Image: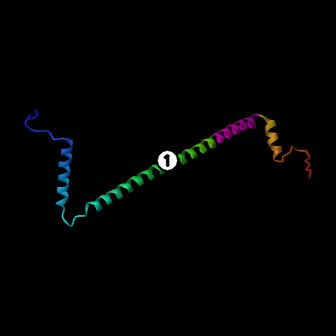
Amino acid sequence: MLNPKKKRKTGTQVVQDLGKSVVKKMRTLSKHDLPLNIICSICIVIFSFSIGFGIYGWVSRLNDISKKEQSLEKLKTELESLEKQLEENRELKIKLVSDPLTIEAIARSYGMSKKGEKIFYFLD
């Protein structure tokens, strides 16, 4: 329980006492110690660099993520294109195995002919 004989300190008195103790400790620093303003300046510089590099790290990560998303979209469209081409090739394979007219059409596109046929080439 609280002792009724002791007076409670006000907030202002607590801050003043704290300030006095800080001033007393600062005066006890030896002459060879770095001055407080130099120490504070060094701390501020180190803190600023750490904040700056932290922000730079986040920004570079965001740039990397956006580049990877763009390359992912390109790869998706390329995959769709290759799947479509694969399906067309499968259909052509089935036609080549089962349809003789398809075989003949492809052979003629390469300049082949049946025995006894004559091929005429027209020059423009």
Question: Is residue 89 in the magenta section?
Answer: yes
Question: Is residue 85 in the magenta section?
Answer: yes
Residue appearing at x 21%, y 42% in the figure:
11
Above or below for 43 versus 5: below
Residue appearing at x 20%, y 66% in the figure:
31
Left or right: residue 51 compared with residue 68 = left
The residue closer to the viewer here, 89 or 98, is: 89
Q: Amino acid at mark 1?
A: Leu
In the figure, residue 72 lies in which quadrant?
top right
Residue 35 place in picture, x, y as percent: 25, 63
Residue 38 place in picture, x, y as percent: 29, 62
SS for dot 1: helix
Q: How is the image coloured?
A: rainbow
Left or right: residue 114 compared with residue 96 = right
Left or right: residue 107 compared with residue 62 = right
Mark 1 neighbour class, 10 Å CA radius: few under 14, some 14 to 19, many 20 or more = few
In the figure, residue 75 lies in which quadrant?
top right
Above or below for 60 versus 84: below
Residue appearing at x 79%, y 39% in the figure:
103
Residue beneath disc 1? 62
Farthest-out residue, left? 5
The residue closer to the viewer here, 17 or 100, is: 17
Farthest-out residue, top? 1
Specify the quadrant that holds the N terminus.
top left
Left or right: residue 12 compared with residue 79 = left
Main secondary structure type of the part rendered in magenta = helix
Residue appearing at x 21%, y 46% in the figure:
15
Give the extent of the magenta segment: 80-98
Residue 80 place in picture, x, y as percent: 64, 39
